[in-house]
Amino acid sequence: MVLTDKNTPEAANRTVILAEDDPVTLTLAQKMLTEKGYEVIACKDGLEALEYFLQKPVPVVITDIYMPHLSGEELIEKLNQTAQKPVIVVISTEENVHFVLKILRQGVYDYLIKPLKRDEFVYKVDKAFELAHYRELCYHLAQEREILHAQKIDWERWKEILLHRESEKRELNLFQNIKASLSQAAGFGNLLALIPLIPLQSKKEDDFYKVRVDLVELLLDNADTARLALEKIDEISNAISANYDLRAISLEELYNFISRQIEDSEPWLQIKNQTISLAELPQQLAAKEVDVDLHYFELAFKELLLNSCKFSEENSDIKILLEVERDKLHISLISSPTVNKFKVRHIPSGYERHLFEPFFRMHAEVDERYKSLNYGLGLTMVERVLRKMHGSIIARNLREYARIGERALIRINFDIQFKVK
């Protein structure tokens, strides 16, 4: 379920056109929707609805079938010919199965039989608006990809630059050296600073020191942090050097796998009262396949989810979409970013590549609530893992417009790509 807030386009544009020639049904349906926060444009026939839509397009149109001047069927046909095709919901007394199927084949999202049931009606309209917003997101994503293609800075070129600049062997040595250095230095400067305090802050009795409790607790805390750091670096080192067991899985299987990872991220979501919306997988994509190692994909995807939760606004909704374009699967994680160390919410121009470099951090502050390391290694690991699976990832700013003429809302889009079989 998508939870909206005042900063999201889906909250800003909750206008729906309702075409219904029966005044009783029109009044009742309008009341049901306005009580749920929707702005309803009530139209007494299809022609009036079409004229309004052509002047001011809205995300969702609800229409009866049998109306004067312009029937519901004619309205659907004309709406589907417009540049900004809305999500269409039909309400009718017609129950003939063949007729219902005929209408649904015209691209109608849903068909409800009158009299309307309040809960079902409102739920279907909610889902229609959710679909409309995902369509809008897909449109913006497609535009961003076209820009990438036109500027010739797509992932293939970026990957070539990386491969020429540093080999995987050098990267592996880098992480092994860091691990060795941290081990020899007991992990952190804090430990080195605390250990000399033991004789100064303690009382020596024969062969023992009577150490203050708070000092021991500090030592234990920092030792635990150092241990976690070494484990994380070891995890990254292993991920880079491991032999991957790639196997073909369907997009439906991958979609269900991602859904389970989202469920496991609930503790992170609760920290800032966030939600994650996973768009439905189009049925025509379910049987397509990609080659992945699910163990390492889980490692990378969980890191991306954690990153999105940590650096997204409170009460925001993180959106995940699976699309296929030009024989490539795109898994998009779209979030509403917090202000970073550059005093902006977007990725500064030229820094898109740096996000995946070891030890690069966009945010200076550390949020202890997530109990995670903040060395700037997480996205490095994600990129290297995906590369080992012949996949890729890019990060881009995504601009969304709630209404024409309004200032764009900036999102961050992490776009995972795999070749579709």
Image: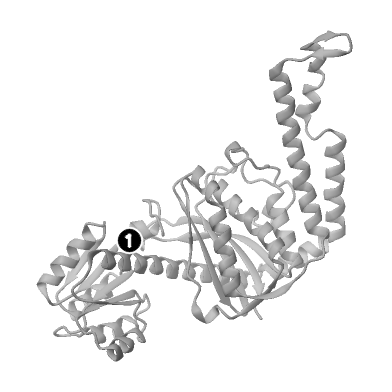
Where on the picture, by quarter, is residue 127?
A: bottom left
- Is residue 190 something one can see in this rendering? yes
Q: How is the image coloured?
A: one colour
- Is residue 166 something one can see in this rendering? no
Could you tell me which residue is drawn at 26 percent across and 57 percent down? Answer: 36
Q: Residues within 10 Å of mark 1 (few under 14, many from 20)?
A: some
Where on the picture, by quarter, is residue 124?
A: bottom left
16 or 280: nearer the viewer: 280
Give the percent coordinates (x, y) of residue 367.
59, 38
Residue most extreme to the left: 23
Q: Which residue is mark 1?
A: 13
Q: Quadrant of the C terminus?
A: bottom right
Q: Quadrant of the N terminus?
A: bottom left
Give left or right: position of 283 versus 347.
Answer: left
Give the percent coordinates (x, y) of residue 264.
57, 54
The relative height of residue 338 versus residue 299 in the rendered view (above or below) is above
Could you tell me which residue is drawn at 55 percent across and 57 percent down? Answer: 262
Give the percent coordinates (x, y) of residue 371.
63, 40
Give the percent coordinates (x, y) of residue 105.
36, 87
65 or 400: nearer the viewer: 65
Give left or right: position of 325 versus 174.
Answer: left
Give left or right: position of 9 versus 331.
Answer: left
Give left or right: position of 377 versus 85.
Answer: right
Kindly state the secondary structure of the residue where label 1 is placed.
loop
